[in-house]
Amino acid sequence: QIIDQLKAIGSSADWSRSAYTLSPELSRAVREAFVRLFEAGLIYRGHRVIHWCPRCLTSLSDEEAEPQETVGKLYHVRYVVADDPSRAITIATTRPETMLADVAVAVNPSDDRYGDLVGRSVILPILNIEIPVIADEYADPEFGTGVVKITPAHDANDFEVGVRHKLPMPVVIDERGTMREVSDAQGRVPQELAGLDREDARERMVAMLRAGGNLVKLEPHTHAVRHCYRCNTVVEPRLSDQWFVRMKPLSVPALQAVRDGTIRIVPERWEGVYIHWMENIRDWNISRQLWWGHRIPVWYCDACGSDPMASRTDLSACPTCGGPVRQDEDVLDTWFSSWLWPISTLGWPDTNTKDFKAFYPTDVLVSGPDILFFWIARMVMAGYFFVGKHPFHTIYLHGIVRDTEHRKMSKSLGNGIDPLDVVSLYGADALRYTVIAGMGLGVDIILDPNNVEQSFAVGRNFTTKLWNIARFLLSNIGDDDVQPLERIPSERLTRADAWILSRLDATIAEVDAALGPPRPGATERWTETERRAGMRLNEYAERTRAFVWGELADWYVETTKGRLQSSGEDRDVARAVLVHVFDRALRLLHPIVPFVTEALWQRLPQSDRTPDTLLATTAWPLRARLAWPRAEEFELAREAVSGLRQIRADYGIAPGATIAAVLIPSSANARAVLAEEQALVGRLTRADISVSGDPPPGAAAHALLSDGSELIVPLEGAIDVEKECAKLTNELTQLEKQLAFLLKRLENDGFVSRAPAHVVEGERQKARDWTERRERLREKVKQLCGT
RNA sequence: GGGCGAAUAGCUCAGUUGGUUAGAGCGCCUGCCUUACACGCAGGAAGUCGGGGGUUCGAGUCCCUCUUCGCCCACCA
């Protein structure tokens, strides 16, 4: 239905198809993007050491090669000076197997210890060949022995040194991580090492070094080793030809957008991470040696040897010489199509589509921080480069689901929770509500895979509650027309009606505040207030739940029970208010409880709804009024109910027993309120309530309401005077203690003169109220305890 | 090695520019199958706000420091 409605408002996209499939539309967009970058000189082919996964057999970008803390060993190896066998230098390495491809050793030019060796040679152990000692800033005098071996083909940094010093670059490890001479090695791999896996070769090399007396020492060493993000295999630096995107020019507007507030990242602290990455951005290796993916749209002509040609259409012959051409064998990094997502889904490269004009830029991009660089930052760059505009104005980064030991849920650890299991057990809404309610801004969500029921109890209980409220409403509302609230004259509303309507308004206001001001297309800097506001989804979930459960169900629904059974005009008022409030509650909840709210809303009797309207497309609720007369007065009735229930519990009065209770108002207004609400209070507490000026004689339980009105429950025989006396005395003691603190604060000149006036006035009012209450309590205690 | 964040009830977390007696859910205790709901209702217990110091009339909130976790970045072999 929603898809139909989207189509009805002009969307022409095929919404049933994932943007990630290799659809012709996406292929066209990917090729267009590649060619545009190529023509702009931002894509180039480079020969260098890149990250390579020997299991996936493909190159990886910097982001795909994840550094992981690894405990390894630091091997100290002795290299004898060629022209002075009495002298040797020691070199530290974590990867002795790459020694076979060493072409030099480097020392820092400022390092006095080795100055005389620069330009001379040392003997590479095992191979017994001479390699030069060179001076290069790359060598850090502070680390290890200050001498570093240079292996240009198997280390990205060594490669740079190799380029600077025009060194040969023999390759001794192949694409599968096996020891083998691949190019220019000239007999560097000994027979006994050939064909060994790099790990095995390391063991063997160490043994050989030790046997030759060249292993000086071996110590534990913790360092970051890059692993393939897909299969977790240790990444092998590998010398190869790859395609790269020059990122620096692309990063300029993307950096500016976050700096000037065009794009806001929530939580804010990620902005720093984003900015740091952008400022230090490195070229993006986009070619992959995989079978599945968008093939790189570049053709080569072997006949005339012209430069590689990028093309929007497949080439069958060389445009220069007419000779045969061949297409590049590699495919593109999957993220190369992903970064086009905000534009490709809307029809790009055609920007005249209805979708594009209607929906670009979009509003909020929701994602986990783990793909901030892979995807989000690149989408921003693509938006600016290809369309000239930001793709969204807000980036919302949510937490990651973890187990009780705070580990990411993963298949290999077996600590995951299958969402589909949760859906079948408790429903999709229970899952959704639980996760949103449990997700503070910037905080991970902890769920217990060993106790799925308890983990999702919040959502399950709440959605069930919602369902049951509707069951009550629908079975008690009857078939007569329900009036829209606007047609009910406000003087017909009861205090309970006014109270729930005011609570609804307050809830709407608080939810709006939690979600924050909508600011599409903002271009100036966000204010501090706005920066802090918004996107607090857990607060939104909690506030709506508290309203629906704690106020609507626990109080208002209970107050309507009598009225709905009656047949007077008041019944229609109650029905109108109940339907109105529940309708608004469903609208507020719909984004986090979509299925249950939609199903219930469809059954609500409402005169202004056409049969095919969806809750999903109705308007977000607005506050009705600034104030609801008499709403506040209902609090006195609620207090009376709570007070009575507490007394019942304290004295263990049988739940089924009806008791008598007397309310003694503290003012004329309180008298009016309590007299009008006494029937309701009585029904909610199984009590016969009377409002009187005088306390009844005999032993009784007492409660003092906040306005000074009293609640007295005569309990002749059942009452334990001593206990009642102790209870009130305790209450009095507490109050006196707090009052003493308060008065001390008010006597403090520092407080009175420096605190803002409204704070001081608030405290004074409080002092008056407490003093009044204290007097009444003292009276009671005197009466009861006879002291 | 840099940078950032967190520490509040048994557990998971709120607490918005410092200002009532610090809150919620789950769990726990007591009593209830009250005709919407036991996935429920009513009542209740439970916190030296990680330790120490400071600023302030006033600190869970701001500053310093220590401890313990976590995240991001980084070519130190």
Image: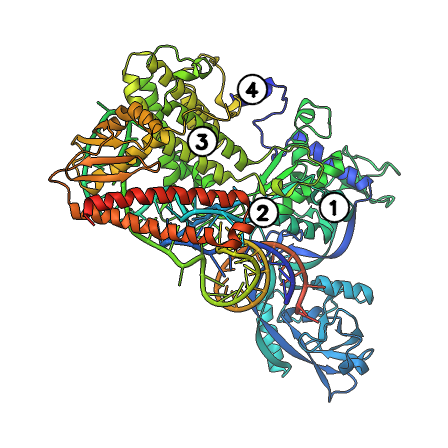
Q: Which is nearer the eye, A539 or A683?
A: A683
Residue A628 location in percent, x, y? 45, 25
Question: Residue beneath label 3, please?
Answer: A593
Name the chain under label 4: A
Instruction: Tell me whether marks 4 and 3 sit on the same chain.
Output: yes
Point 59% across, 43% down: residue: A532
Point 66% across, 36% down: residue: A393
SS for dot 3: loop
Q: Nearer the viewer, mark 3 or mark 1?
A: 3
Question: Residue beneath label 2, please?
Answer: A369
Characterize the local packing of mark 1: few (<14), some (14-19) or many (20 or more) Cα atoms within 10 angstroms.
Answer: many
Residue A224 location in percent, x, y? 60, 63
Distance of label 4 from label 1 (alpha carbons) = 38 Å
Instruction: Tell me whether marks 2 and 4 sit on the same chain.
Output: yes
Q: Tell me if residue A548 comes above or below residue A230 in the rendering.
A: above
Question: Residue beneath label 1, please?
Answer: A251
Name the chain under label 2: A
Asked if one can make out residue A588 in the rendered structure from this viewpoint, the answer is: yes
Point 82% across, 41% down: residue: A40
Distance of label 3 from label 1 (alpha carbons) = 39 Å
